[in-house]
Image (cartoon, rainbow, N blue to C red):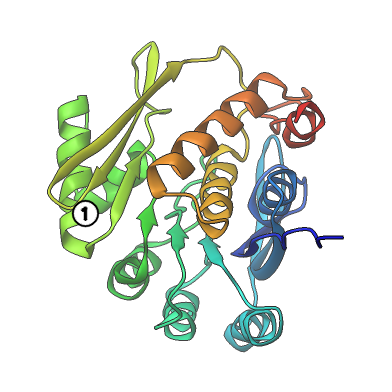
């Protein structure tokens, strides 16, 4: 009997969301639903729910880098997703540990939560720019994050594309500029390579408040597909479709911006 193909080994480096909708919890659900093997390095512990973030406690730097080493040195890794980091020191230490690893790295430059809680100060953003972004295969900023990284207000698709291209040129990576925060009736995500636009993905805007964890889910999904050997463009397309369906199937939990339906998508697969 031929043994089953081993799942892609995906390491998620991010903060913990106590309510289960975003962060490491969303990463684990996503990676598992897509057939990957999820490993984690938790950077911070948050107390949060659909109404907001009540507290954030960053873990010691040594504890974070040891988690990374424990996974990589024994299990191995096929792709990495990076989300919330918690401090400039953590960003720099993570970058140092990942230097030269030679696997796809998807960096979601988390700065503000869905409920508008600040998750990265300017020092952390600066550290991401100088240490982590040069290592990234793909950056996945939403429009507010792209504005923070580009230093200007972005109103049109052309402006968003130009800002994303500038980042791609600066760091030699791809940039997926997510359009969920735009005012257009259709959501447009722009995948940009060094030198200009690579692909444009458009989909309907769903009328729902249940979008907690969409950014975490998308970046984890892309990392899982990349780890399984899919080309970047296909990985992004499939990840976007997974997120859209999870939004459609959101369970409706909580009084605020609720989680999306990772498991419901999995049951349909």
Q: Is residue 140 visible?
A: no
Q: Residues within 10 Å of mark 1 (few under 14, many from 20)?
A: many
* Residue 255: quadrant of the picture: top right
Q: 61 and 190: which one is in front? A: 190
Toward the front, the furthest residue is 1
Query: Which of these two is toward me, 251 or 165?
Result: 165
Q: Residue at 40% across / 48% down in the picture?
A: 232
Residue at horizontal 55 percent and vertical 59 percent from the top: 227
Classify 235 as above or below 204.
below
Q: Residue furthest right?
A: 1
User: Quick check: 23 above or below 209?
Assistant: below
How far from the left and from the top, in percent, is residue 116?
51, 40
Q: Residue at the location (40% across, 83% down)?
A: 100
The image shows a total of numbered marks equal to 1
Q: Quadrant of the N terminus?
A: bottom right
Which part of the image, by quadrant, shows the C terminus?
A: top right
In the rendered image, residue 202, in percent from the top left (x then y), is placed at 38, 21
Is 64 left, or right, of 267 in this rendering?
A: left
Query: What residue is shown with label 1?
Result: 167
Is residue 126 visible to us here? yes
Left or right of residue 16, residue 107 in this image: left
Q: Nearer the viewer, residue 50 or 177?
A: 177
Give SS at disc 1. helix
123 on left or right of 90: left
Give percent across and percent down for residue 221: 57, 46
Q: Position of residue 17 (x, y in %)?
A: 71, 52
Position of 75 compared to 140: left or right? right
Q: Quadrant of residue 169?
A: bottom left
Q: Is residue 198 above or below residue 211?
A: below
């Amino acid at each position: 009997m031929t043994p089953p193909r081993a799942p892609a080994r995906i390491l998620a480096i991010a903060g913990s969301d106590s309510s289960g909708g975003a962060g490491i919890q969303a990463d684990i659900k996503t990676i598992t639903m897509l057939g990957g093997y999820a490993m984690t390095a938790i950077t911070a512990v948050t107390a949060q729910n659909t109404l907001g973030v009540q507290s954030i406690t960053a873990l010691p730097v040594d504890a974070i880098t040891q988690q990374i080493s424990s996974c990589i040195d024994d299990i191995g890794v096929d792709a990495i997703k990076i989300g919330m980091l918690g401090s400039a020191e953590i960003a720099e230490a993570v970058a140092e540990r990942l230097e030269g690893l030679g696997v796809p790295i998807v960096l979601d430059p988390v700065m503000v939560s869905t409920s508008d809680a600040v998750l990265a100060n300017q020092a952390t953003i600066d550290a991401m720019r100088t240490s982590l972004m040069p290592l990234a295969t793909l950056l996945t900023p939403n429009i507010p994050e792209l504005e923070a990284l580009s230093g200007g207000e972005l109103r049109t698709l052309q402006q968003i594309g130009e800002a994303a291209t500038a980042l791609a040129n600066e760091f030699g990576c791809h940039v997926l500029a997510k359009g969920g925060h735009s005012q257009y009736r259709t959501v447009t995500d722009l995948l940009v390579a060094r030198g200009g636009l690579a692909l444009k993905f458009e989909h309907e805007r769903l009328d729902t408040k249940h979008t907690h964890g969409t950014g975490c889910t998308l970046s984890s999904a892309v990392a899982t597909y990349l780890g399984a050997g899919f080309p970047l463009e296909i990985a992004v397309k499939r990840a976007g479709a997974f997120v859209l369906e999870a939004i459609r199937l959101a369970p409706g939990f909580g009084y605020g911006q609720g989680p999306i339906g990772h498991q419901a998508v999995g049951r349909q697969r």
